[in-house]
Every structure is written in C-alpha cells, then in structure tokens.
C-alpha cells in the first residue's frame, strides 16, 4: 500500500505535470512541426480526471493482453480497423503483423506519422 501511495504522489506532482509533457513529442514523427504540442498537452491537466486516467493507463496497460481483446472483438463480429503511423516508436510494426496474422482487420498505414497519426496527419 505504501509503494502505491508513493507512486501516486510521484505521478501527480512530477510525472504527469512535468515529465510527460516534455516526453510526449517523442510520439511524433516530426515534433518540430508541432511546437505547440507540449502546451496543448498541458491544457489537458486542467480537466478533472485527466491525471487519474493517465495513472490508470500506466497501472493497467501492462496487464492487458491486446491480442485477446482484438480476438474477442472479432469473435463478436466487430470490424477491426487499425490506423498506424509508419514511424511509430511505441508500437512496432511486428506487433501489427502479429495482429494481422491473428484477426481480420483493415489496416491503414499513415506515412510521415508516429504514434499519434490522428494528430500529425488528420
């Protein structure tokens, strides 16, 4: 319990408001094209629940099995569409290939985009 509280405190006072805003541009293929990106990230800090959502992602994403989630969706007949930035450094293309080999999907590869292609190439 103590470690959890220390981690939460660190995330609230350092990670989310100070460390993440300066590291987010690494998700962009050409961060120099988006000089306002850090400021736009910081704007979100004012919204109730933003920090809690980030903390939840940090805590729970490592425990999820994304492949199983996609398989469950496909099993229910839910169409799967993946939009992936060609220069994504967070999710490698090998993960996309594994997904393609596992479930039927429609894949859109966005050139000149990183991990957040919807932002870089809307």
Image (cartoon, rainbow, N blue to C red):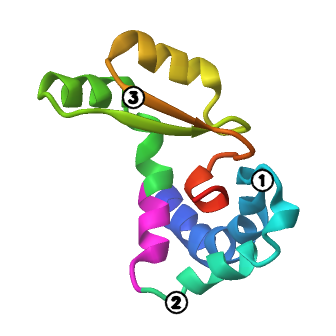
Q: Residues within 10 Å of mark 3 (few under 14, many from 20)?
A: few
Q: Residue at x 72, y 73 (%)?
A: 37
Q: Which residue is mark 1?
A: 26
Q: Residue at x 69, y 65 (%)?
A: 20
Residue 57 coordinates in the image, percent (x, y): 45, 54
Residue 53 coordinates in the image, percent (x, y): 42, 66
- The part of the image, by quadrant, that contains residue 72 is top left
Q: Which residue is mark 2?
A: 46
Q: Which residue is mark 3?
A: 106
Q: Residues within 10 Å of mark 1 (few under 14, many from 20)?
A: some
Q: Residue at x 45, y 51 (%)?
A: 59
Could you tell me if the residues under marks 3 and 1 are in contact, i.e. CB atoms within 8 Å?
Answer: no
* Label 3 – label 1 distance at C-alpha: 26 Å
Could you tell me if the residues under marks 1 and 2 are in contact, i.e. CB atoms within 8 Å?
Answer: no
Secondary structure beneath label 2 = loop
Q: Nearer the viewer, residue 112 or 1?
A: 112
Q: Residues within 10 Å of mark 2 (few under 14, many from 20)?
A: few
The quadrant in which the N terminus is found is bottom left
Q: Residue furthest top?
A: 101
Secondary structure beneath label 3 = strand
Q: Nearer the viewer, residue 99 or 11?
A: 99
Q: Earlier along the polypeptide chain: callout 3 or callout 2?
A: 2
Q: Earlier along the polypeptide chain: callout 1 or callout 2?
A: 1
- The part of the image, by quadrant, that contains residue 102 is top left
The reply to whether residue 35 is visible in this rendering is yes
In the rendered structure, which segment of residues is drawn in magenta? 48-56
- The answer to whether 81 is drawn above or below residue 8 in the figure is above
Q: Earlier along the polypeptide chain: callout 3 or callout 1?
A: 1
Secondary structure beneath label 1 = helix
Based on the picture, tell me whether residue 73 belongs to the magenta stretch.
Answer: no
The reply to whether residue 65 is visible in this rendering is no
């Amino acid at each position: 319990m103590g470690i959890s509280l220390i981690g939460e405190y660190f995330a609230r006072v350092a990670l989310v408001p100070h460390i993440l805003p300066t590291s987010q541009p690494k998700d962009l293929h050409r961060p120099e094209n988006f000089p306002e990106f850090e400021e736009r990230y910081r704007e979100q800090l004012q919204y109730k629940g933003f920090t809690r959502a980030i903390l939840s992602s940090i805590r729970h994403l490592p425990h999820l099995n994304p492949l199983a989630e996609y398989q469950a969706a496909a099993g229910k007949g839910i169409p799967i569409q993946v939009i992936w930035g060609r220069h994504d450094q967070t999710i490698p293309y090998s993960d996309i290939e594994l997904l393609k080999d596992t479930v039927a999907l429609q894949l859109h590869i966005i050139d000149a985009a990183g991990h957040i292609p919807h932002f870089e190439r809307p």
